[in-house]
Image (cartoon, rainbow, N blue to C red):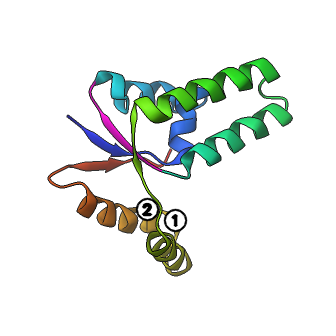
Amino acid sequence: MSVFFGDTSALAKRYVTETGSAWLMATINPKIGSRVYIAHITIVEIVSAITRKERGGHLSASDAQTVITTFEQDYFQEFSIVPLTTSLVDEAKNLAKKYRYAVMMRCSLRRLCKLIKNAQIQAYNL
């Protein structure tokens, strides 16, 4: 089983077709045996991203609602949720100040690896 940490920009590709969507669906998908960890705040970020696409005219209101409903169902059924504690948020904030995003993502994944014993983590920032 492959284990992944999905950030919001990657997960959005699962629900709205854009560059990288096909690859993501073929690679990072709980339905094919992948275990996907996401941060608790991801539900807010995905809903926000979808409603921005709707306001920007990239999605109809009904398509946006369908995407949000599908994600809400998947959120509880297909993903492992990593709770955000004050210390984890503070650590991420400090890493964001100190490093560029890509480095921060790798450093955060090291911390996530400690939470997921014996799992091989793969991260994709698409």
Query: From the viewer's perspective, is 59 left or right of 37?
Result: right
Q: Amino acid at mark 2?
A: Met
Which residue is at 51% across, 38% downward?
Answer: 11
Q: Position of residue 17 (x, y in %)?
A: 60, 25
Name the residue located 57 percent from the left edge and 36 percent from the top edge. Answer: 12
* Callout 1 secondary element: helix
Per the model, the C-alpha gap separating discs 1 and 2 is 6 Å
Q: Which residues are magenta?
A: 33-39
Residue carrying label 2: 105
Residue 104's place in the image compared with 47, above or below, is below
Residue 46: image location, x then y, percent:
62, 41
Q: Position of residue 56 (x, y in %)?
A: 84, 36
**93 lies above or below 51:** below
What label does residue 77 carry, if any? none
Give the position of the N terminus as an image quadrant: top left
| Overall secondary structure of the magenta section | strand
Q: Locate residue 25, reporting x and y percent.
A: 43, 26
Residue extending furthest toward the left: 118
**Which residue corresponds to mark 1?**
101
Task: Name the quadrant containing residue 52.
Answer: top right
Relative vertical location of residue 100 with respect to residue 23 in this rendering, above or below: below
Q: Is residue 2 above or below residue 100?
A: above
Q: Is 72 or 109 nearer to us in this picture?
A: 72
Q: Nearer the viewer, residue 114 or 27?
A: 114
